[in-house]
Amino acid sequence: MAALGNPGNTIAVLKKYRFNFQKKYGQNFLINMGILEEIIEAAQITKDDFVLEIGPGIGTLTQVLCESAREVAAVEIDTSLIPILKETLSAYDNVEVINEDILKINLAEFVREKNGGKPIKVVANLPYYITTPIIMQLFESHAPIESITVMVQKEVAERMQQGPGNKEYGALSLAVQYYAQPEIVADVSPDSFIPQPKVGSSVIRLTRHEKPPVDVRSEKLLFQVIRASFNQRRKTLANGLNNFGAFSIGKEALQSCIEELGVPVNVRGEALSLEQFARLSNLIFDRQNIE
């Protein structure tokens, strides 16, 4: 039975192995059984599911996943945690621990190999310093992922849900909403972890769209336009696009595309919706292929 949600059991394991927390890996281990159960419920894990867990730590969430899912693959970068996981997960025959960097794994190939190419679910207590690269890697891999349920820094979870006109709205908001429907399912206080982080946390579920909510000529160009628009937030959209240097048309042509979109030329990127960014990227794509 899963036992590491109990603080005393976690402390005993850490002492037994004389484990030293690695700041470079952003390690904060959950010690709140209620939150663990909320994560499983939010991710809607069943005995039919193959689950990819990123950063299992000492196996706290992994134990609960093993009891709920058909199969679990836990990818852990820290070599010193592998012998601990061997012990804490010894009671389970449906888990594989993989000592790798998740950012270096070909996820589409991984899912083909481990689950026959059928959709998987991702569940994780993510290291806060590398949350965005991991989320984007999961989406941009185009691996068949049904949902991503992760613990992240509270302000990052809120940013994923934001819409136009909010100061927290930005490239991450748009990228997440292009690929998935974000929903914060729980807020988590620092005292739910060992060691306690200095910030609040949230569990957010990202349910993958069957197809993106907008049609674009080029996904790559869409994200170039988005990055350019938020790269220098204080500048106008036209100046941001022109300064980015990735487009083969000049400032006047870019301004013309913005005008054709039906917004003021001095508008800033934070005022545009995902739908408007999609239309703008299509206008730029068409103009680049004419000139």
Image (cartoon, grey):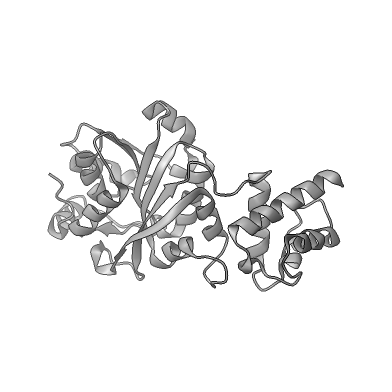
Looking at the image, residue 28 lies above or below residue 110: below
> Could you tell me which residue is drawn at 38 percent across and 37 percent down?
120
- Residue 120, placed above or below residue 254: above
Left or right of 42: which side holds 100? right
Residue drawn at (68%, 60%) of the image: 228
Quarter of the image where one finds residue 50: top left
User: In terms of image quadrants, where is residue 15?
Assistant: bottom left
Q: Is residue 58 visible?
A: no
**162 or 86: nearer the eye?**
162
Position of residue 284 relative to residue 97, above or below, is: below
Q: Position of residue 63 (x, y in %)?
A: 21, 44
Q: Residue shown at 54%/66% (left/top)?
A: 169
Residue appearing at x 75%, y 65% in the figure: 238
Circle count: 0
Residue 269, percent from left and from top:
65, 66
From this viewpoint, which residue is outermost toward the front? 262
Q: Is residue 176 visible?
A: yes
Question: Does residue 215 appear to the left or right of 87 in the view shown?
Answer: right
Tell me the quadrant of the picture where the N terminus can be found. Answer: top left
Residue 277 x/y as whole percent: 65, 57
Vertical comparison of 10 with 146: above or below? below
Within the image, what quadrant is residue 116 found in? top left
